[in-house]
Amino acid sequence: MYINSAYLNNSKIAIKDKSKPLIVTSCGSYRLHTIEKLPTLRPRGRLDYQLIYVASGKAHFHFGDKEEIITAGHMVLYRPKESQKYEYYLQEQPEVYWVHFTGGNVKNILHSYGISDDLKIFHCGSSLEYQNHFRIMIQELQLCKEHYPELLEMHLRQIFIMLYRQLNSDSKIENSILAEEMDKAMLYFNKHYNDDINIEKFASTIHMSTSWFIRNFKQYTGQTPMNYILSIRITNAENLLENTEYNLTEISRIIGYENPLYFSRIFKKQKGLSPSEYRKNIKKN
């Protein structure tokens, strides 16, 4: 299992701190490699808030007697002292990010971003931007440079802002035949992500103009179609770098790039590391 996490003051103890409006206390990510199942059970919950982002694959959450299977592009929010029970399964290839936070004004802050008290699961879209914000928070907690608590709050608020915009977009497109068409498009892109997809031709097959399709797809997912396809390619590249011995040329072709140098440049732009550096980092961890 790949874990990358960090904790405020290097303490894993959950805290309740009202000295500031919003305080990030820990952040991390999980990806299963060999462990078949990773369960979490906290009957009494925690003292702080926890936001979990499913970046790829699936995760299983339990609320009372009801199990919810959460797919990529969704988040789950736990409030203080709320019972927590969830599992990740290797066969479903989950990649999840999480952040714990506390503060004296958290409830009002969440309300200001459209997150009501009864909202537990919400569609946020599959965006590399979310992953980048989580990774930066992990790094800031690990390095503890000057003013890092303020940067942590800034990146968490950026996630909230992205959520707010997505929730508003969902409310505009909900109960529309467009939602069904966008779901079909997402399924098609996930299946054919390594093909040379022409967005203009695809839009014509569903009887939409290119601009109309791109606008509605971005409203529904938070990304343009090409950025959505890119995020799938990068995620699959990560899986191949972590779990196989394929060389970079082979991986490049598998995910849809004939030129391995171009693949390396795209990967580094998205992840901050070249594919070879990323693989070395994984093995070191």
Image (tube, rainbow, N blue to C red):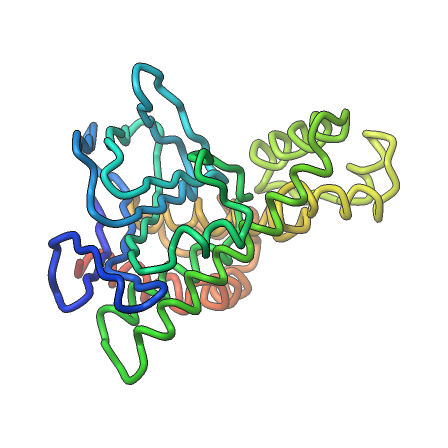
Q: In which quarter of the image is the N terminus?
A: top left
Place of residue 258 in the rendered image (x, y in percent of width and height, measured from the top left) = 57, 53
Place of residue 31 in the rendered image (x, y in percent of width and height, measured from the top left) = 28, 43
Q: Quadrant of the C terminus?
A: bottom left
Q: Residue at x 21, y 61 (%)?
A: 6
Place of residue 267 in the rendered image (x, y in percent of width and height, measured from the top left) = 47, 61
Does residue 61 sit above or below 11 in this rendering? above
Q: Residue at x 20, y 28 (%)?
A: 36
In-front residue for pair 261/37: 37
Q: Which residue is drawn at 38% across and 61% down?
A: 275
Does residue 248 sit above or below 155 in this rendering? above
Q: Is residue 114 left or right of residue 103?
A: right
Outermost residue toward the top in this view: 65
Q: Which residue is drawn at 34% across and 65% down?
A: 137
Outermost residue toward the bottom in this view: 146
Q: In this view, does 95 lie to the left or right of 164?
A: left
Place of residue 276 in the rendered image (x, y in percent of width and height, measured from the top left) = 34, 63
Quarter holding residue 277: bottom left
Q: Is residue 235 left or right of residue 220?
A: left
Total labels drawn: 0
